[in-house]
Image (cartoon, grey):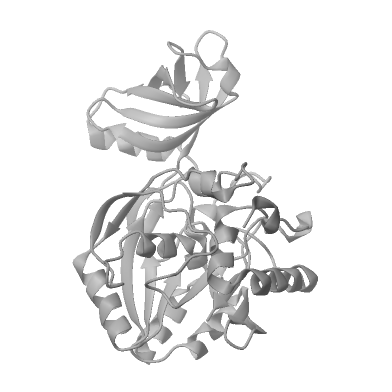
Amino acid sequence: MKLSHFNFELPKELLAEYPSEHRDEARLMVLHRKEQKIEHKLFKDLIDYFDEGDVMVLNNTKVFPARLFGNKEKTGARIEVFLLRELNEEQRLWDVLVDPARKIRIGNKLYFGDDESLVAEVIDNTTSRGRTLRFLYDGSYEEFRKKLNDLGETPLPKYIKREVEESDEERYQTIYAKEEGAVAAPTAGLHFSKHLLKRLEIKGIDFAELTLHVGLGTFNPVEVEDLSKHKMDSEELYINERAAQVVNNAKANKRKVCAIGTTVMRGLESSVSSDHKLNPYEGWTNKFIFPPYDFSIANCMVTNFHTPKSTLLMMISAFAGHDFMMKAYKEAVKEGYKFYSYGDAMLIL
């Protein structure tokens, strides 16, 4: 399949600027692949499609406040710095994106905070917008990380044009987020409320957790018509022994294994044994899933509605079947479903 197969008209008003008032009351479109049938529900109705012994796999990554604003030495120009990943704890080296990038060269210093107590020096150019920064800060590593957290703000997706609000800190985070390291939330999980998780637990649904620290590469536009030539950025992935066991038991017992989000699906498919079992894993993945693709682990998934030509849409297409997915998306646009991070959800069975 080619890039042009994943284009569709998405009206701007369908990009969700705000989340639904209650997490589990977003709309839910249910896709039955076998019957090629579509239903319209609320997210909390998800429970009706699962039985005792089924497994939901969650991504427990936690978003850190990755967006900082600093001032360039001498000129005082305001520069946005987006923290991507820590390269070296001891030397306080970070991979970042800067904006406007044309003003930031090797050797420049940036000052952060009213008291300018945090300083960063540009030591390398990595891409057109990418830089490597060395942070200079008088204090322990723990104090330095606290300083970053205090100065940073929630990194809402670029398409949300409004200012970050206090409520975003809590809402742009899943309620089961534990392991800090993502620069974007695994958004399918944003729809789960404590109440819904409790109800699922009481019904006998099992949960397994993995950690995939979402990077910005997930959202990089695909710019090649031949999808096999697109390269995904690497993201850190951890799957422990317990998660692998829970998933493999469910598979052996022919239960549902539901990937909650595209990041979970990518994580699961990154560590598959030759006999289609899930292996524990610790490392990096740059797995890119697009049609045609045979999935080994999950047999259903929850996901949000994604933007045209995105790698996320390509994965959904591989899982749901391209024609059925495009039909569902056409219906979603007609019915006014909200798209992207704070948008509505889809359950593919």
- Judge by depth and name the residue closer to the eye, 295 or 329: 295
The x and y percentages for residue 243 are 26, 70
**Residue sitting at x 56%, y 14%:** 76
Q: Would you say 301 lies left or right of 340 here?
A: left
In the picture, residue 103 is in which quadrant? top right
Q: Image height check: is 110 above or below 178?
A: above
Q: Image height check: is 118 above or below 348?
A: above
The x and y percentages for residue 83 are 44, 36
Q: Would you say residue 77 is visible in this rendering? A: no
Q: Residue furthest top?
A: 74
From the image, which quarter does the N terminus lie in?
bottom right
In the picture, residue 136 is in which quadrant? top left
Q: Would you say 303 lies left or right of 181 here?
A: right
Q: Would you say 162 lies left or right of 269 here?
A: right
Q: Residue furthest left?
A: 241
**Residue sitting at x 66%, y 75%:** 324
Q: Would you say 248 lies left or right of 316 here?
A: left
Q: Would you say residue 335 is visible in this rendering? A: yes
- Judge by depth and name the residue closer to the eye, 98 or 149: 98
Q: Image height check: is 16 above or below 47?
A: above
- Judge by depth and name the residue closer to the eye, 63 or 321: 321
The x and y percentages for residue 183 are 45, 46
Tag count in the figure?
Answer: 0
**Residue sitting at x 27%, y 77%:** 248
**Residue sitting at x 55%, y 85%:** 45
In the picture, residue 91 is in which quadrant? top left
The x and y percentages for residue 317 are 59, 66
